[in-house]
Image (cartoon, rainbow, N blue to C red):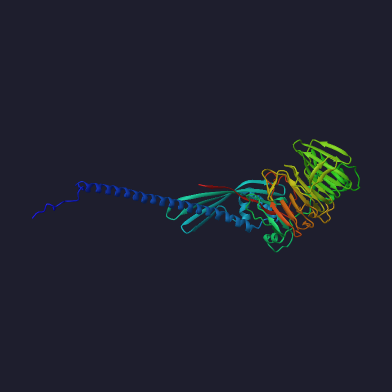
């Protein structure tokens, strides 16, 4: 029996089901699947790219390391060879002539014999998956011969090639450098820090530590910075070569310079009497020679006045002033007997037969000469002036000696251009008779507490001494001495060997007492990456 209130229905009222709805959902699902699949594949691709890039970067870094290792191995080999050579070293006259002749013929034989190596030098090495090969070669760049020594400059190059196992690309690098060797009777400024003639058992590093010496490396030099200790007495007592240059004469021994001959050279009346104490400017047929000082100097002052170098000599016999201008080629010489003017420059050599009781820099005064200044760091040596100061007896440094154009920052000197050359040399032997005297070079007790000295110091006799307490001595240049007494004070040393303009042919400096081998320069110049 059917009921009016019950009937069969297919769904709820208001909801209709279409046959095409199920197909639309399928399309949306496929679209989303393709989208996410594309993103996933893209991420996988990018990961592979990044992995490859990272791999290439890692390989490139490893190649750079391997190539750098080749350069370091080649450089280490050269530095170890220079250390084994133990330079400077005394040699015989026979070996000096043999080295000179072989260098003339074959060039690099000189550096090969000294360093005990044979060029080219090939080194192979590996570590893990990296490997390298370095090739070091050398050639003679310049040979300069003087009367008593010669200089050979060499250009060396290290070429390195780095590689990886199972990786085809390779990395190449090169390092160019320069080395300069000297042989013979060498100018002492080319031996920057030399303690000579004492039987010292300790090494240079131990000697520096015991004597409170701090050595700062100079520029790009790769040479060891510690003092060189030599049992051979390489500091000469014979200043005859410099005396000959200053007086413009030729003698075979100091005793050949009799009072008669010396008076003739100095322009005095002929006599057998000794030369009176005083300062004598040497005149020659070609201009001016050096300066000869008979007796002790109470105070020797250096100063700069405009474009002129001023040197004053204060002695018991009076005051002498020497003023010359390289820019104007003009010299004024003032003595107790009057003033003279010359259109020539003097030879930069001052020979003193006695002591220099006070040496330093200051300011020039027209009437009183140079007044030493101790409480200010005033440049006192004109740029481009080369001055060699030789005294038979003791030299006492009482104030700063600073070259023009050198700036000090935090105790470190900075040099941007060619500088003057100041050499201070005490022979420890009478210049005219050859008899031993005290000699030596002293930093005075009343000198500035933090004194700056820019010179090459060579001390025979009692050697080099620092007086006073709690002193800081800053030395820029060179120190060659037979003995060293710090007195508990500090020495801050920066080696500055002569530059290219002060070569062995023209440098007015004391020569080593015996023939030596010296490595005056060893530095890197240019690193290249290919």
Q: Is residue 145 above or below residue 436?
A: above
Residue at x 27% of width, y 49% of height: 29
Q: Which residue is situated farthest in the left direction here?
A: 1
Residues 199 and 314: in front is 314
Q: Position of residue 85 (x, y in %)?
A: 64, 57
Q: Which residue is situated farthest in the bottom direction here?
A: 201
Q: Which residue is situated farthest in the front direction here?
A: 4
Judge whether residue 168 can be spotted in this image: no
**On the picture, is 321 further left or further right than 195?**
right
Residues 11 and 475: in front is 11
**On the picture, is 361 further left or further right than 157?**
right
Q: Is residue 299 above or below residue 306?
A: below
Residues 44 and 521: in front is 44
Q: Position of residue 349 (x, y in %)?
A: 78, 45
Q: Position of residue 299 (x, y in %)?
A: 83, 48
Judge whether residue 215 can be spotted in this image: yes
Mark count: 0
Quadrant (top left/top right/bottom left/bottom right) for the N terminus: bottom left
Q: Position of residue 72 (x, y in %)?
A: 55, 54
Residue at x 67% of width, y 60% of height: 205
């Amino acid at each position: 029996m059917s009921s009016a209130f019950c009937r069969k229905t297919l769904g709820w009222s208001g909801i209709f089901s279409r046959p095409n709805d199920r197909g639309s959902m399928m399309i949306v699902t496929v679209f989303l699947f393709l989208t996410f699949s594309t993103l996933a594949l893209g991420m996988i691709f990018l990961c592979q790219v990044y992995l490859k890039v990272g791999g290439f970067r890692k390989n490139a870094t490893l190649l750079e390391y391997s190539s750098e290792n080749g350069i370091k191995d080649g450089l280490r080999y050269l530095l170890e060879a220079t250390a084994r050579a133990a330079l400077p070293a005394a040699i015989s006259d026979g070996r000096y002539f043999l080295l000179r002749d072989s260098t003339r013929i074959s060039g690099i034989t000189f550096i090969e014999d000294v360093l005990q190596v044979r060029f080219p030098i090939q080194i192979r090495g590996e570590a893990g998956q990296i490997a390298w090969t370095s090739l070091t070669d050398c050639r003679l760049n310049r040979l300069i011969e003087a009367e008593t020594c010669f200089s050979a400059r060499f250009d060396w190059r290290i070429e390195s090639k780095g590689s990886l196992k199972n990786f085809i690309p390779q990395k190449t690098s090169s390092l160019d450098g320069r080395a300069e060797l000297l042989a013979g009777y060498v100018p002492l400024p080319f031996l920057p820090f030399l303690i000579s003639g004492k039987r010292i058992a300790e090494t240079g590093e131990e000697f520096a530590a015991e004597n409170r010496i701090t050595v700062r490396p100079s520029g790009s030099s790769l040479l060891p910075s510690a003092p060189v200790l030599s049992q051979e007495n390489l500091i000469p007592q014979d200043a005859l070569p410099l005396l000959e240059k200053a007086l413009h004469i030729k003698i075979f021994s100091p005793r050949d310079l009799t009072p008669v001959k010396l008076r003739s050279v100095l322009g005095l009346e002929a006599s057998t009497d000794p030369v009176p104490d005083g300062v004598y400017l040497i005149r020659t047929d070609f201009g001016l020679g050096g300066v000869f000082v008979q007796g002790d100097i109470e105070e020797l002052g250096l100063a700069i006045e405009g474009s002129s170098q001023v040197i004053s000599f204060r002695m018991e016999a009076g005051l002498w002033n020497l003023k010359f201008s390289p820019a104007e080629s003009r010299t004024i010489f003032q003595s107790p007997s009057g003033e003279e003017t010359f259109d020539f420059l003097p030879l930069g050599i001052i020979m003193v037969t006695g002591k220099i009781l006070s040496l330093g820099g200051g300011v020039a005064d027209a009437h009183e000469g140079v007044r030493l200044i101790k409480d200010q760091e005033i440049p006192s040596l004109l740029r481009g002036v080369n001055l060699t100061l030789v005294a038979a007896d003791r030299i006492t440094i009482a104030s700063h000696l600073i070259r023009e154009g050198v700036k000090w920052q935090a105790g470190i000197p900075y040099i941007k251009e060619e500088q003057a050359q100041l050499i201070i040399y005490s022979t420890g032997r009478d210049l005219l008779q050859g008899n031993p005297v005290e000699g030596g070079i002293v930093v005075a007790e009343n000198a500035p507490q933090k004194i700056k000295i820019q010179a090459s110091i060579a001390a025979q006799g009692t050697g080099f001494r620092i007086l006073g307490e709690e002193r800081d001595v800053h030395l820029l240049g060179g120190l060659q001495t037979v003995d060293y007494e710090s007195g508990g004070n500090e020495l801050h040393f920066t080696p500055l060997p002569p530059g290219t303009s002060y070569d062995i042919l023209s440098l007015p400096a004391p020569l080593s007492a015996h023939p030596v081998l010296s490595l005056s320069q060893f530095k890197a110049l240019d690193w290249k990456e290919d």
